[in-house]
Amino acid sequence: MSALSRRFSGGVSSPELAVFVSGVVSMGLEILAGRMVAPQFGSSIYTWGSIIGVFLAALSLGYYQGGKRASRRATEERLVRVLLATGAFVAVLILAGDLLLAGLSGFPLPPRFASLPAVTVLFGPPTYLLGFISPYGAELSRKESTGAASGHVYAVGTIGSIVGAFGATFLLIPSLSVSLIGLVFGLLLVGTSLVILAPSFPRRTVLATLVVGVLLVGAVAVPSAGYSVRGETVYQTQTPYQELVVADLGDTRTLYLDGQPHSAMDLEYPNRHVFEYTRYFHVPFLLGDWRNETTASAPHQSGDIDRVLFIGGGGFTGPKRFVNDYNVTVDVVEIDPEVIRVAKEYFGVEEGPRLNIYNAEGREFLRTTDRTYDLIVLDAYKKDKVPFQLTTREFMQLTADRLDEDGILLANIISAPTGPASQFYRAEYKTMNRVYPQVYSFPTSGGSVVQNIEVVATKSDARVSQAQLEARDERRDIGIGLSTELADYQAEVDTGGVPVLTDDRAPVNALLEPMAGRRYVVSQTGPGGNVTTGTG
């Protein structure tokens, strides 16, 4: 029996196996690309459009070149060489992917195209090589006609792509790190090569196969020390929603989501506000119903706020501090179950009578709950990845419906306060103002840089002045003064030229685009209250 007619158990020929595996790896790498690129360029629609476009272009070019060469050069040994070359590129992705992404991020391109060079350089070559497999497989097929061979190859390759898509999405990404997922795909290519070479096992080709296997394993082993510019990596994983990293730098433990700092905790003083913007979460307690405003003092005054809902958990800085400082009950809704688990294991979060945690999507939770709240804190936005369903007028109306008559909404928005990069912030302010009578704004880092901006909306018709807020703050005695934060009170916001966001039209990605490539500044507070500037 000739090599071309040799079949494995189940009747699968070696060309069919190669085509199937190429489909698995190509689609798996495409999904993995989104996770690798997101920490550097975000995961906006422009990033995903670049990834899909580059993969389609590279595969098309590979199909074309492979088809030209297949009739005179297609052999099983050359099929193996293509698989091994692809495996070697995967090893480069594992070993130097982060370095290449950083080096390729400085091209002077419009923000929406910023990720295109990096995606092309990192994922173009291996995807191009995988494009050779299908025409080679069709040429080596035992089918009687060209049409039958082509149709069979397309079907097998597509089935492989389906397996790669579902396997990467539902099995690998929730379970393994980016480097280990790359190792799985690389070893799959190496293993397929060995199966195709059996039983003859040409010495030179087998040696090349072993070399690529060693490169893949070595690429994973080399960076295993676990230290980066973020500090010592305590824990790292890929969740169904994002890349998650917990890192310690000195006495500070930081939670990174898709490469951006989300929460931080002082290991020596766990309840201290490390990120300055989380101190602004206390501002609503000065905006509540202060019926006894003329009294001499109001220690631990909570402004008639008894029940609080946080949409978005992260490291649970706000919920933990609220439970510690006030006589309130806090509910937290977090969509990512791994974030909840990590918060409990690494950030000292403990559920109890006054802290309840729900694994759910924020809007769905609000739609189905029968509870009402005095304060809702919306802390589910990222710099470049904002769930549009949590930004619209309809959603804001839903929050108002779940607040009592004097209820307050606080939204933690990442944007610039002025300039082109302020479009999302100004649109969200305008949208909230369509539902709530009064809206207050507090930029947290000064200037026009991309930063956390706390937007507070109240159902009360009465406007509270900055002087009133400062007077109320002076009369509290809870261990946290907000005089510095209240100085950032922004009385007016220009909302011209930006839309009101609705379920029917919420161009969030377009509004976020001007922030692409802009530095995200996160101000931090020291143990003595001094403020420093960090970079996300």
Image (tube, grey):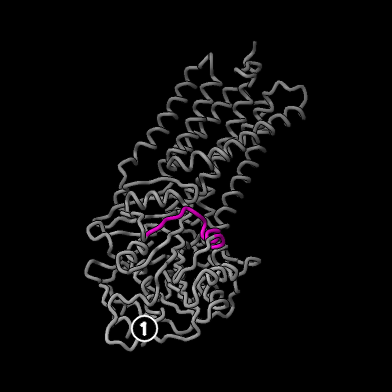
Residue 69's quadrant in the figure?
A: top right
In front of the other: 18 or 308? 308
The quarter in which the C terminus is drawn is bottom left
- What is the span of residues highlighted in magenta in the rendered image? 355-368
Local secondary structure at mark 1: helix
- Residue drawn at point x = 49 percent, y = 59 percent: 107
Q: Name the spot of residue 419 as percent of width and height, x first.
A: 49, 76
Q: Position of residue 177 (x, y in %)?
A: 42, 42
Question: In the image, is residue 343 above or below residue 481?
Answer: above
Residue 110, magenta (yes or no): no
Q: Determine whether, in the image, residue 85 is placed left or right of residue 256.
A: right
Q: Is residue 110 visible?
A: no
User: Does residue 342 appear in this view?
Assistant: yes
Where does the N terminus fall, quadrant-wise?
top right
Left or right, 179 with reference to 199: left
User: Residue drawn at (41%, 78%), measured in percent from left and top?
Assistant: 288
Above or below residue 7? Residue 234 is: below
Q: Position of residue 12 (x, y in %)?
A: 63, 21
Closest to the observer, 148 or 292: 292
Direction from residue 259 to residue 402 in the image, left or right: right
For residue 395, which quarter of the picture?
A: bottom right
Residue labelled with disc 1:
469
On whether residue 356 falls in the magenta region, the answer is yes
How crowded is the residue under tag 1: few (<14 C-alpha within 10 Å), some, or many (20+)?
many
Name which residue lies at 43% across and 59% down.
332
Residue 374 to residue 88: above or below: below
Residue 195: x and y, percent? Answer: 53, 21
Amino acid of disc 1: Leu
Query: Above or below — where is 170 with respect to 51?
Result: above
